[in-house]
Amino acid sequence: MTKKTTKPMLLSAAALAVSFATQANIVAPAPLVSIPTHDAFFDHLRAHCGKAYEGQVTVNNPASSGFEGRLIMHVRVCEDNQLQIPFHVGDNHSRTWILTKTGSGISLKHDHRLEDGSNDPMTMYGGHTVDAGFDRVQSFPVDQYSIEEFVKAGIPASNTNIWQMYIYPEQFTYRLIREGREFRVDFDLTKPVDLPPTPWGYQ
């Protein structure tokens, strides 16, 4: 009787040891951490995935050109950790806002392309959250990469840029503020519009 039970028990112990060894050799990726306000903000925007909305400039002080024509935002690409939102200005399809969860907050980048799809000389500037923000409001103070690019481009006034985004049930707002400058576009989320063309440089 003893001989009949010893072998299966030894086999089970050996299988268990192999299982533990196998598990010990598995390298799992580190989790991408986030906090509730950042998650909620991200999800409020992602809820509009695949839709486009028309907006208008509501603040432009001091007045500057470059935003004439129909203004359309399109929540075009929605991944777990990234949103891509082209911002079309008339026939200019050069701008895409890229929001990315980084593990220490949310990054906002402005991807600017030329009509042939190549990078604009000034591209991928933006900022990163530095606090919790709110479920529907996040601020993105200018990041170091952008500061260095603005200095190279001879526009150091932009070194204090803060971009803000508000996402409410009926309105999305994109806002830029710095000393002596405020720019704001409000989009009507109650009336989806026809999808705009593919932004330059994308497929």
Image: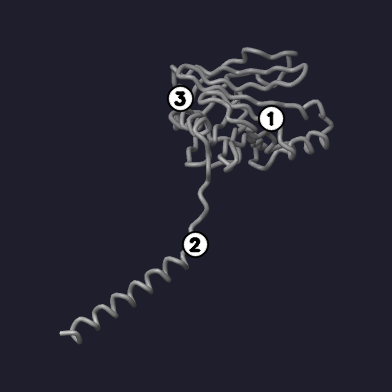
Which residue corresponds to the image point at 50% horizontal and 17% vertical from the top-left? 171
Identify the residue position indicated by label 1 in the image: 141
Which residue corresponds to the image point at 63% horizontal and 28% vertical from the top-left? 92
Q: Which mark is residue 68?
A: none
Front residue of 20 and 82: 20
For marks 3 and 1 on the same chain, the one whose residue lies earlier in the sequence: 1
Residue 26 position (above or below residue 116): below
Quarter in which the N terminus is drawn: bottom left
Which residue corresponds to the image point at 48% horizontal and 26% vertical from the top-left? 52
Front residue of 199 and 48: 48
Disc 3 vs disc 1: which is toward the camera? 1
Which residue corresponds to the image point at 63% horizontal and 41% vertical from the top-left? 117
Q: What secondary structure is found at the residue carrying circle 3?
A: loop
Residue 18 placement: quadrant: bottom left
Residue 90: percent from the left, percent from the top? 60, 23
Q: Amino acid at mark 3?
A: Asp
Identify the residue position indicated by label 2 in the image: 27
Count numbered badges in the picture: 3
Q: Residues within 10 Å of mark 3 (few under 14, many from 20)?
A: few
Q: Amino acid at mark 2?
A: Val
Outermost residue, bottom direction? 3
Marks 2 and 3, how far apart in space? 46 Å
Q: What secondary structure is found at the residue carrying circle 1?
A: strand
Identify the residue position indicated by label 3 in the image: 194
Q: Amino acid at mark 1?
A: Pro
